Image (cartoon, grey):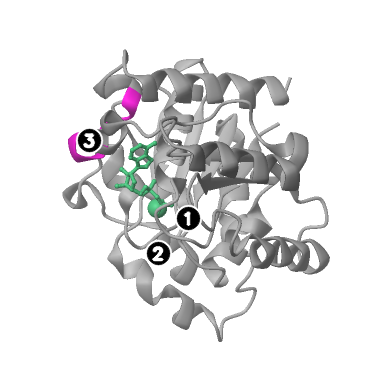
């Protein structure tokens, strides 16, 4: 059975895309077939796995707005076992164009249902909002992985995120679960990181992963080379931690 996980937090810059790319590549390195769906008009996951604009003929916008088959958008990446449905800036108009359309909340689910059997896991990299694209992602998913930056106001906005999850459960996807909560960009040299760690674990209890992603400069460099961290610098702390996360996620799925 294919398992679909959305990576979501309506705050920007918390590590959604970094986690989507490197968790995906990590699980692929462990022999799983992974489809990454870039659902953000910024296209950071797309460029982060080395897919350039020239390689893209159709993207997630064509799937959502024009109901083109998802199979026609899938691109193989240089990382064995990792494929991507790319996004480009044209996705930025999709929310407005989708609003008057039929079945606007279930477009992504319908498209994914036709291809997902070829994969063990699908990871959807959500945009930094709780709009229609994110609703599509939640409707298409089995669960949601929430990256939380180890910074001031880490928990701010999470109640709106949880409300949106409840709304999608009620109207479109009753079995939607929380996959896990991931602490990202952790700085061990400050007390703040530990405070946030304690606070997040108090709130989310055992939903928080044991793995904590540290702040690691190699993780921020890798996207400009179009490589997951395991291929850019396999000996880095970032690679080690994202491999640990991949193991933890796979262990949670037996
Ligand atoms: P989001 O998708 O939530 O907006 P990103 O994954 O794009 O967040 O991360 C925001 C920025 O922080 C990017 O420039 C990324 O390279 C960098 N970054 C993410 N995680 C780390 C980390 N653990 N250490 C250092 N830089 C990171
Ligand atoms: Mg992103």
Label 1 or label 3, whichever comes before in sequence order: 1
Inter-mark Cα distance, 2 to 1: 8 Å
Q: Residue at x 73, y 67 (%)?
A: 163
Q: In which quarter of the image is residue 121?
A: top right
Give the residue at mark 2.
62
Indicate the position of residue 84 as horizontal and vertical percent values: 40, 41
Indicate the position of residue 143 as horizontal and vertical percent values: 69, 45
Give the residue at mark 1.
69
Quarter of the rendering occupied by the N terminus: top right
- Residue 174 versus residue 29 in the image, above or below: below
Label 2 or label 1, whichever comes before in sequence order: 2
Q: Of helix, strand and loop, which one carries label 2?
A: helix
Give the residue at mark 3.
221
Q: Residues within 10 Å of mark 3 (few under 14, many from 20)?
A: some
Indicate the position of residue 173 as horizontal and vertical percent values: 77, 58
Inter-mark Cα distance, 1 to 3: 33 Å
């Amino acid at each position: 059975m294919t398992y679909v996980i959305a990576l979501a937090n309506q705050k920007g810059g918390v590590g959604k895309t970094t986690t989507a790319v490197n968790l995906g590549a990590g699980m692929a390195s462990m022999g799983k077939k992974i489809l990454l769906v870039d659902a953000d008009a910024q296209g950071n996951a797309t460029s982060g796995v080395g897919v350039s604009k020239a390689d893209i003929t159709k993207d997630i916008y064509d799937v959502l707005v024009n109901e083109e088959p998802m199979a026609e958008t899938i691109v193989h990446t240089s990382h064995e076992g990792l494929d991507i449905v790319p996004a480009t800036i044209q996705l930025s108009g999709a929310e407005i164009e989708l609003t008057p359309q039929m079945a606007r909340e279930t477009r992504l689910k319908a498209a994914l249902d036709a291809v997902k059997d070829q994969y063990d896991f699908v990871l959807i990299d959500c945009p930094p909002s709780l709009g229609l694209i994110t609703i599509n992602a939640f409707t298409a998913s089995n669960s949601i992985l929430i990256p939380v930056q180890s910074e001031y106001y880490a928990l701010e906005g999470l109640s709106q995120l949880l409300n949106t999850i409840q709304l999608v459960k009620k109207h479109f996807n009753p079995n939607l679960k929380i996959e896990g909560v991931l602490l990202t960009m952790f700085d061990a040299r400050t007390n703040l990181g530990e405070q946030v760690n304690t606070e997040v674990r108090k709130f989310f209890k055992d939903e928080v992963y044991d793995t904590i992603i540290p702040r690691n400069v190699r993780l921020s460099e890798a996207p400009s080379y179009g490589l997951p961290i395991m291929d850019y610098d396999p000996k880095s702390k970032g690679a080690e931690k994202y491999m640990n996360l991949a193991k933890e996620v796979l262990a949670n799925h037996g």
